[in-house]
Amino acid sequence: MDFTFTEEQLAAAEAARGVFADVLPDAVPSPALTTGAVAEGFDRALWSRLADADLLSLLLAEAHGGAGLDAIALCLVLREAGRVLARVPLLEHSAAMAAVQAFGGPEQAGRLLDRAGRGELVLTVAAHGRTGHDPAESAVTARRDGQAWLLDGVQTAVAWAYDADLVVVPAHTEDTVAGRTVLALVPREADGLVASEQISTSGERLAELRLRSVRVEPEDVIEADGAWEWLHALLVTGTCALALGLGERVLRMTGEYTGKREQFGHPIATFQAVAVQAADRYIDLRAMEATLWQAAWRIASGAPGALPAAGDVAVAKIWAAEGVRRVVQTAQHLHGGFGADTDYPLHRYHAWAKHLELALGPAAAYEERLGDLLATHPLG
């Protein structure tokens, strides 16, 4: 494999750095000082700048006004978003559009993608399931009602649900012996869809969505085999990219602080105990980076491997979830009491890291999935 980025991918990352350059992590109230959500919705001004820079349509084909790039380019942009705690549904929106483009019909794509690529239509995905440990597709059932579908079930921790125009909901059917998964594009105001507010550790509004015989017309359902598995893999890998960017920024903050903070007349960065802990976290970040690009490359290229791409995605999420937790915990320790100061942004990164650690399931859930894959595809 060759992890050298193309000129187009590097250009996307450079454009993202320009857009995110003025984003301040403390632009909203601190989640430590707020009992509810830190804001009613996402950062619409930043969303407009992303649209103007053509970063919302990154994965779309030129026919839909996009750049025709891949999962690697998206992860490079998400990495930049993670560094500044960008409050936009960039991952969910981009992944949902990519799934419609890859697996939906031409009528569906023509109706949605141009508007979504311009940011006029906002998409999100209900991908967490009931607990984050169980498969999200098992949380909702889909049954036929003539040509339409009726959805019943519960999805928790749905990111940006209150801001989205459409929610992509995976649902399992019972029309075959094993069942299958379809993707339903559900309008946020659909009859039978009830949202209850949940607050993430980062202070953002999530939603528990209860679906009670929600009717979805056939033109709003993707029935193609493999659509959900591909979408889920892209979402998980994008979450790893956000965690990597966050962790890199936190380690840089820690280096800057320990290089200035003195004890006994010397910067504490020169103390062996401090240097060893920082080095361990640097190793975590490099492992997070290597496994992220492996997963993104498998998704982008479709290349075969000893395990299905889901195995590489699971490894990336395990490293991202555990690695970002260790990075922020060590940063907090090395900052001492200053790290808990709510006027300093480290506590915000800590809160976002916990959210990303658990988003789409904790490391333990992916360890189980990896074990199942190894049992099914034993390595020779």
Image: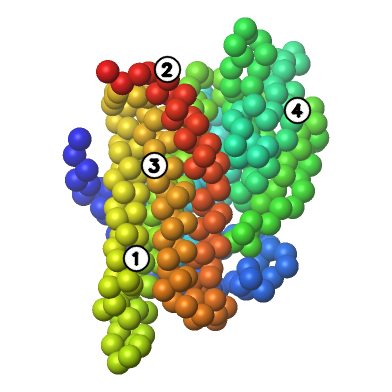
Residue 232 image offset from top left, x and y in percent: 50, 34
What label sits on residue 152 in the rendered view?
Answer: 4
Name the image quarter holding residue 302: top left
What label sits on residue 277 in the rendered view?
Answer: 1
Q: Earlier in the sequence, mark 4 or mark 1?
A: 4
Visible residue check, residue 140: yes
Q: Earlier in the sequence, mark 3 or mark 4?
A: 4
Residue kind at label 3, given as amino acid type: Ala
Residue kind at label 2, given as amino acid type: Thr
Q: Nearer the viewer, residue 96 or 132?
A: 132
Residue 110 drawn above or below residue 203: above
Residue 291 drawn above or below residue 181: below
Q: CA distance from mark 1 to mark 3?
A: 22 Å
Residue kind at label 1, given as amino acid type: Gln
Residue kind at label 4, given as amino acid type: Asp
Q: Which residue is mark 2?
A: 376
Q: Which residue is mark 3?
A: 316
**Front tag of 4 and 2:** 2
Q: Earlier in the sequence, mark 2 or mark 1?
A: 1
Q: Judging from the image, what secondary structure is the residue with disc 3 in?
A: helix
